[in-house]
Image (cartoon, grey):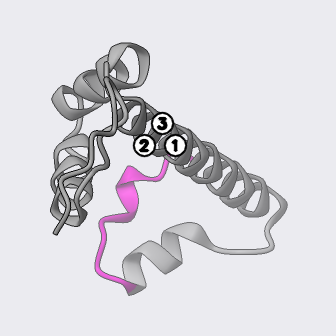
Amino acid sequence: MKNYDYGYGFKPISAWGYVGRAILWSIPVIGWLILLCKAIGAKNRNVRNYARSFFCALLLAIIVAVVCAAVAVVLDLVGVIDVPGILEAVGIDPAIWPL
């Protein structure tokens, strides 16, 4: 196998490197801070781009969760769905629902 010289900052990430970084960056708060640091200042361009894509996916997931929660609140206010009843059916205390 040839030993390629990818130049400064262009070394590819291994498959286990992707897995390890994904696990690390999935840790709340600490992992997210490390993710931000890597997305802004990683010297390896591949790590920096992967961190940026992971950050964008994280933001997209947060936006989708907020929209889903807002839709649930609106549908509960309108009377289309019974959120406390659904929570009780799945075994969650309905007292956590704000309305």
Three-letter amino acid code at the position of disc 3: Asn
- Camera-near label (3 vs 1) is 3
> Disc 1 designates what residue?
53
**Residues in magenta, as a range:** 90-99
- Element type where label 3 sits in the image: helix
66 over 79 or under it: above or below: above
Q: Report if the CB atoms under discs 2 and 3 are less than 8 Å apart.
A: yes
The disc label shown at residue 69, or none? none
- Element type where label 1 sits in the image: helix
Question: Whole-Å distance between the Cαs marked 3 and 1?
Answer: 6 Å
Check disc 1: other Cα within 10 Å, few if <14, some if 14-19, many if 20+.
few
Residue furthest out toward the right:
78
Looking at the picture, tell me which residue is in the foreground, 30 or 74: 30
Question: Whole-Å distance between the Cαs marked 2 and 1?
Answer: 5 Å
> Disc 2 designates what residue?
50
Question: Whole-Å distance between the Cαs marked 2 and 3?
Answer: 4 Å
Q: Assess whether residue 36 is covered by the magenta stretch.
A: no
Q: Report if the CB atoms under discs 3 and 1 are less than 8 Å apart.
A: yes
Is 49 displayed left or right of 95 in the figure?
right
